[in-house]
Image (spheres, grey):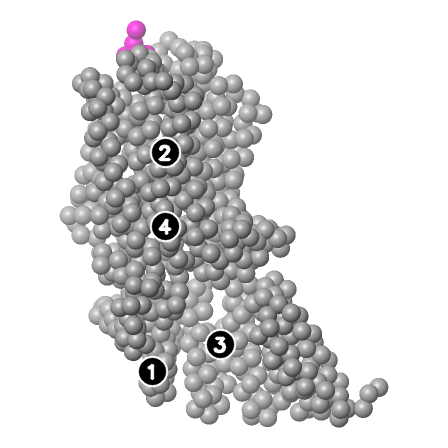
Amino acid sequence: MSRTKNQGGRREREGKKLSARPSTESTSVLSGKRRIAVLALVLAAATIAVYSPVFGSPFVIMDDQEYVTANPHVQDGLSWGTVRWAFTSTETAAYWHPLTWLSHALDCQLFGLDPAGHHFDSVLLHALNAALLFVLLVWLTERIGASLLVAALFAVHPLNVESVAWVAERKNVLSTLFFLLAIAAYAWYVRKPHWQRYLPVAGMFTAGLMAKPSVVTLPCVLLLLDYWPLNRIPHGGEKVGQVSTSGIPRVSWTQLILEKVPLLLLSAASSWITVIAQGRVELTMAELSLRARIENALVSYGLYLWKMLWPARLAAFYPYPKTTPVWELLSAVFVLVMGTTVVTIFRRKAYLPVGWCWFVGTLVPAIGLVQVWKQGMADRFAYIPLIGIFIMIAWGFDDWAETRKLRNVWRVFPPSCVLLALATVSVRQMGYWGSQYDLWSRSLAVEESMDGHNAIGEALIASATGMSQRDLEIFDTEQKRVDEERRHFQRVVEMCRQENQLDRASMASMVEALNNLAFVDRTQGLPDELQREHYEEALQVERELQSQDSVGRYRKLLVTTLISLGNLDVVGKRMEAARQHYEEALRIDRQLIEQHLRPYLPYMAMALVNLAQVNRDQERLDDAQQNYEDATNVFRHLAEQEPNAYLPKLAQVLNARAAVDKKQNRLQEARAHYSEALTIYRQLALQNPGYSNDFARVETRLRELESTTPSR
């Protein structure tokens, strides 16, 4: 018999060792499917218990606003409008992931904006993933002990805390559920290949892509599983079609690849949609050299492995390195080469090359070769990839224990100690998600970054939602909070000024900090000229930024600063300067809307209203009328999509427009606009009594107008 055939038989026997072992696994009172079900339930319950501290955590400002707390579509629950928006929107969050949006909408329908319910569902999904991973591995390999260890490591490892504790990362745990279900469907398909059995595989994979596109690597993972543990590849004298002892027919390489083609096409389509959707994110390949991205990718592989072994200094944000130290790069390359060498030498242990390729391959979409944000790496990116390393560890330990013929207590005690230690670190890591302030304070403690300082300053500004009760006790006065805000924003400006040459991401961070410093000045009642200095410096940086920004990615920052400067001009009675700033903001808004309609409409409406007010004050009533008319059209469009957010603004614009009509003696138009505003305020007052005063004020104006206008 050839060596290849021996290796194939050995791989097949690896999945059958359990039945021959005289261990408690075969003598337990619970046996077979009942035992597996009980262990899966215990694992899920233990996972929920470990993650129970998360239930008391709030939403964080970082992306939770975009996904839940400031997203009116999601807050509407599972309405038809939300479903339509979820399947057509790629502008919010720069992803097409309708199932993720619908899961958040379901949570809002069930729990409203109570964060405990949203956290509970994320934890429940993670627990379900752990239990499903265990059952799936047992089904594929028939090795309960090793499968349980893999699933337990996955359940409690601190690197996975971010995916579970961060509400906005629901997409990670949800897509992984469908990823595992697709593998389960595939394991069912390979036992009797038929197109009808293939459909659930494609269906689950499609669902996974509709939750988060990072699962595009599934077709490659299925090829790995064909090698081990499914053993679908003929070896030695085996023939295609020959059925293995596990009931799985052997298949040629050609057929193995061809049957993945539909899945690869789904991956390609999802990748294409993602590239288009993320064309507006803050970093692209053009902004980072290929060498820098490759170096960061290699170092990140090494860091993920190190953090898997020693999960310390974990953070919500790891800034992209300005330079990569040679020793870090060489160390990472050494680890990758050694890992590849080891699994090649010991390839007869088929789980080693499969686990290693699983880790390396499933990290590719998130390793940074195509860079889409400012992070160098992120804990959440390791959620699926580390399963491969856990398989290597669990099966390696199980085989070593079998070779040494260890007693059951020594098979259980060391892994239990490791799992307990990991669970303890995970609970500690969850504590950092207690508030936005704590989260970013931890990130700064790990590594200083401009984004970290800006985020802490913004958490202090929004102290009611960004800080825990313990944080508020530390900063127990408004003065302490304002001083701390200023310190963090000034630190960002200092870091930027210390750089020899600012990249676009740093310039954007500096603009954000300068705008926030102006806000702090206003909060403290400092002279307007101090605010103006910050805004004008921000404007200078932004103009340089725009000269390097061919796709208009950072123009929103420029619009915000121009409007803020215009508002400051109005306060200082510098109306002509205000007009220039508002008109420039409006021109930029129109350019942005030509590219991406929806996200910039609110900014355009704001610029129109401000410009209208300036024109009205300067008695340029025709110009003001045109501005208000344009603003009315924009707010009508926005109110159709998000009535709760924009109906009040539409009513305000109609009220102001009617006042200009009255000044121009356009009394019929004024009556129509007052009447429409009154109808909106009546509707709003039924839902919120706070609008009763607005209703009464507009009603009084309408009556006054009608008393002076002859009826027709």
Residue at image mark 4? 54
> Disc 4 to disc 1, how far (Cα)?
36 Å
Residue 677, image x, y percentages? 66, 77
Left or right: 266 with respect to 521? right
Residue at image mark 3? 585
Quadrant placement of the N terminus: top left
Sequence-first tag of 1 and 2? 2
> Which quadrant of the figure has residue 706?
bottom right
- Which of 155 and 477 lies nearest the eye of the viewer? 477
Task: Tell me where the magenta segment starts and ends, as one range.
Answer: 1-6
Q: Nearer the viewer, mark 4 or mark 3?
A: 4
At 48% from the left and 19% from the top, the residue drawn is 191
Q: Are marks 4 and 3 in contact (CB under 8 Å)?
A: no
Sequence-first tag of 4 and 3? 4
- Which of 139 and 514 lies nearest the eye of the viewer? 139
Looking at the image, residue 627 lies above or below residue 458 = below
Sequence-first tag of 2 and 4? 2
Disc 4 crowd, CA 10 A, few/some/many (<14, 14-19, 20+): many
Q: Which mark is residue 524?
A: 1
- Confirm whether residue 64 shows in the render: yes
Residue at image mark 2? 43
SS label for mark 4: helix
> Disc 1 to disc 2, how far (Cα)?
53 Å
Q: Residue furthest right?
A: 712
Quadrant placement of the C terminus: bottom right
Q: Main secondary structure of the magenta part?
A: helix
Q: What amino acid is at disc 1? A: Gln
SS label for mark 3: helix
